[in-house]
Amino acid sequence: ASYGDPQRNGLTANDLFDGMAEHLFYTLGTRAEGASVHDLYMALSHAVRDRLMTRHLATKDQLRAGSAKVVAYFSAEFLIGPQLGNNLLMLGMQAEAAEALRRFGGPGLDQVLDVEEEPGLGNGGLGRLAACYLESLASLEFPASGYGIRYEFGIFDQAIRDGWQVEITDKWLKGGWPWELVYPAQSVSVGFGGHVESYGDEQGAERRRWLPAHRALGVPHDVPVLGYRVNSCDRIRLWRAVAAESFDVHAFNEGDFQRAVQEKVASETLSKVLYPNDGTDQGKRLRLEQQHFFVSCSLQDMLRTLALRGAPVQSFAEHWTVQLNDTHPSIAVAELMRLLVDEHRLGWDEAWTITTASIAYTNHTLLPEALERWEVGLFGSLLPRHLEIIYEINARFLQQVRLHAPGDLDLLRRVSIIHEDGTKAVRMAHLATVAAHHVNGVAALHSQLVKTDLFPDFAALWPGKFTNVTNGVTPRRWLALANPPLARLLGETLGDDWPAHIERLRQLEPLATDSGFQQRWAACKLACKRRLAGVIAEQSQVLVDPTSLFDIQVKRIHEYKRQHLNALQVVLQYLRIKHGETEGMVPRTVIFGGKAAPGYWMAKLIIRFISGIAETINADPDNRGLLRVAFLADYNVKLGERVYPAADLSEQISTAGLEASGTGNMKFALNGALTIGTLDGANVEIRQQVGTDNFFLFGHTTEQIAELRSDYRPWEWVEKVPLLREALDLIERGHFSNGDGELFRPLVQNIVGRDSYFLLADLPDYLVSQNDASRLWADPSAWQRASILNTARSGYFSSDRAIREYAERVWGVEPLPVAMGC
Ligand code: 26Q
């Protein structure tokens, strides 16, 4: 096989320059003279993409020819971030790209990287996790494909106007996006609605068949995912929906052009927009249509490649292992059964053996409002055959439960896939759990709670099914790419290939007390803080002091994540300054960032509140540089790359038991931030790894919160905190809202009245911990030591470690290095 034009594979600045010149002319139809920054971005991207193609085709050829088991990572979200900089890093061509651009004499690499639109095809943690995992799969040379949806509009862009969040449509495709390859010939058809009928097959056996009322076509758009300094180049296959016929010919011929076009519009709506809720499931029909659409496309695609390998359908589970990223793709259980039983005519038992051998499920939440359920009426009208199949799966499962616990009718009610009290609904987490060979949580504590609180009945039935795989993040994007000064220092200290061997970070431990190394460490951090200060100044005209303590909380806005606890703490610090009680305080810059779901009113009010305190506090001359507050608008992957490296203190302050893992917490620690946090999610393991002295712990434990819950009167906690009464009064009376005494009343009432997330119970301890942080900051050498140790001991949180665990304990797959003839 050919692996392309040697010149188009060349890795020198010269080769890259030639490639860019060629793409400017032939691909972009423009001249090098007068090329815009965007033209240069496109030309460089195409030239880099050429270098991926060789590796991508070699990877695909090797897979097609062989029989290695391939990982199919099913996720409704992939938050992949900007591609150009990352691919240059993977290829080891950053310096060459900078040099090639210099020869064009125009903008530099940073400027060119900055024009890339990031595809916001996810909400937050879960979508970003999927992207980190595909990157590690490729870097560790595992054959894999991500499967998801190519939303035309991703997560909205956030603007802040008058302190409020404003949502702006994300038009990420507007300038053309060079990182996808379209394969129209591999399109597949997906059915919706209609009815099911019985018929007799050739052998006279009764079978069921689904006659959908509508069909849409899925067109695959592949994003290549190159591993770090290897030839393995996997892909994320994203499906775009188009009309099955370009328009309804019959209606068109009748002269009903409107109706002819309508069908087309309806089909193409399927992949139009990402749902921006990351917490509550509103049970919308279109959302279920999206899920079925991408899952059906993906499974059909997988069966097709199985046939290409010449393997029988019975061997599906030897060729593919499917990971469900939460329940969003859990319709896969019923769809795979339908494809095997109805289309491939397998017997039920054989099909069930294949399905359960190939599917595993990751749970990402315990919050009841986030567990997906679909009303049976809606489900049956959209997917009548799938509902039948789910009833059959449930009947067989409940029979098994009856044998296990004779007479326990309440157990049957609790575990049934169909929720039967009131409006009947399909419980997707039950469907996924019944079918999956493994169910995992995403941090040690969370996986424990999955067994004890969420699925105790299932855990008793199948103790071996439940496991933990603590999340991880890729050290390539989140350290090597995002933090150039530190990457350079690590290269000098650990050797250039440290990003592929993250356990080497441990070798930093002996340097933690070395004053020369501490100084270099601090210089890296300061450089990153200056860069972030520049972003803040440009965005919001707020000037922050890069030598102050950067105290940062970035994540989706949620009551359980308690951004308002942090905001309350800021107000209390401000009052201490106003009262002249500045003993022990150090100059701090408190930075917030994150999007609120558009329909989540309290989350939006929290953003307004942060804007309000920022405005008031930043304008108050009494501060004398002790306190600044900034809200970073439009927090996304690209901004994250500026934020994590610049943090001194990482706020991970969710109510214990509610944050499944967190992954931002890992990105901060990897970049040498100290965490102030509760014993929640992966914080527990971060604290264990970095050492209890290098982590500011506070708050009630999961068990203590459970105890509090039974008899909690938040108002009784108010008096326990000095200045808190005064703070709450100031907030209510409009001190942070230009005298508006109505605006923040619901927020204060929420806290003092119900306080569902136990802010007031955790506040006293939080304040003590914040003081501890200030005290350590006042001793720079002690702080640097702790910071170095945080990085040195965070290797565990690499997605390489997480992927190795999935590969060994869940998927049963092995690396398959890609040999390339060039
Ligand atoms: C469901 C139904 C309908 C519409 C939207 C949704 C939906 C979409 C996205 C529900 C949830 C999400 C996203 C959840 C998420 O990001 N969870 C986070 O996953 C991370 C990776 O495991 C964890 O680190 C976080 O703790 C967890 O909150």
Image (tube, grey):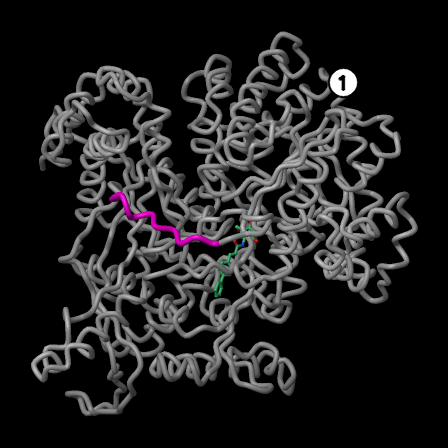
Q: Amino acid at mark 1?
A: Asp
Image quadrant where one finds the N terminus? top left
The percent coordinates of residue 339 (x first, y second) are 27, 72
At x 75%, y 50%, the residue is 739
Pick whichever, 697 or 79, lies toward us. Answer: 79
Stretch of the chain drawn in magenta = 167-176
Image quadrant where one finds the C terminus? top left
At x 53%, y 56%, the residue is 440
> Is 171 colored magenta in this rendering?
yes
Does residue 288 lie above or below 560 as drawn? below
The percent coordinates of residue 678 (x first, y second) are 72, 45
Q: How many dots with numbers?
A: 1
The crowding category of the residue bearing disc 1, from other C-alpha atoms within 10 Å (few below 14, some 14 to 19, many at least 20), is: few
Pick whichever, 287 or 723, lies toward us. Answer: 723
Question: Dominant secondary structure of the magenta stretch?
Answer: loop
The residue wearing badge 1 is 779
At x 31%, y 45%, the residue is 143
> Is 645 colored magenta in this rendering?
no
Q: Name which quarter of the figure residue 292 lies in.
A: bottom left
The percent coordinates of residue 83 (x first, y second) are 34, 37
Does residue 378 lie above or below 618 as drawn? below
The percent coordinates of residue 572 (x first, y second) are 81, 41
